[in-house]
Image: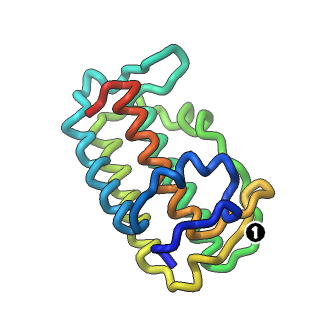
Amino acid sequence: MPDTRPKPDEYSPHHEQYVSLIEGPILDELAAGRESIRRLIDQVPEERGGFRYAERKWTIREVIGHMADAERIHTFRALTFARNDAIELPRWGPDAYAAAADFNARSIRSLVEEELAVRDATIALFASLPAEAWAREGTVTGKRLTVRAIAYIAAGHVKRHLNVLRERYGVG
């Protein structure tokens, strides 16, 4: 049921920082997030893409690239569990992914367009799920996750990073 908030036992305590950011129906939140992502094209001049607010923090380009990577990971997990695959999924390493991706060699526009394509695929996946799939679950590094919780985590993760871009990077 996409309009039913996940209960705290459907995700790990770490994910509360993302789930708590989602206030409305999840499919509406994903669509609204898409528009916020799209605005980054106009909000981030190309010359600011390499800005980092502190040493060893990601650049603006790396944050945007990370949003696409993370959303792909989240939707892969949701697809796996929605299709009743009982495999336990591993943790992923965002810093290693960002280092291997070389996001700083890309334009802001290309990174935003990629995240928009990922978001469109995310919306299509969650919109297509039958009602019973939302309660299906699996484990990631020994922690229980439901498909419903993953949808909220995916939307909230991007929302959190958009907030960080605004608050710490001066975007928007």
The outermost residue toward the right is 142
- Image quadrant containing the C terminus: top left
User: Residue flagged by tag 1: what amino acid is it?
Assistant: Ile
Residue depicted at x 45% and y 72%: 125
Q: Is residue 161 above or below residue 126?
A: above
Q: Secondary structure at mark 1?
A: loop
User: Height in image: 98 above or below 47?
Assistant: below
Horizontal and vertical percent position of residue 52: 42, 20
* Residue plotted at (33% across, 26% down): 49
Q: 55 and 25: which one is in front?
A: 25
Q: Quadrant of residue 59?
A: top left
Mark 1 neighbour class, 10 Å CA radius: few under 14, some 14 to 19, many 20 or more: few
Image height of 5 relative to 50, above or below: below
Classify residue 103 by image quadrant: top left
Colouring style: rainbow
- Depth check: give the residue in front, 33 or 25: 25
On the image, which quarter does residue 30 sit in?
A: bottom left
Q: Is residue 131 left or right of residue 90?
A: left
In depth, the one of 49 and 32 nearer the eye is 32
Q: Residue at x 44, y 40 (%)?
A: 161
Q: Residue furthest top?
A: 55
Residue 54 in percent (x, y) is at: 48, 16
56 sits to left or right of 30: right
Mark 1 sits on what residue?
87
Q: Position of residue 83 (x, y in %)?
A: 62, 79
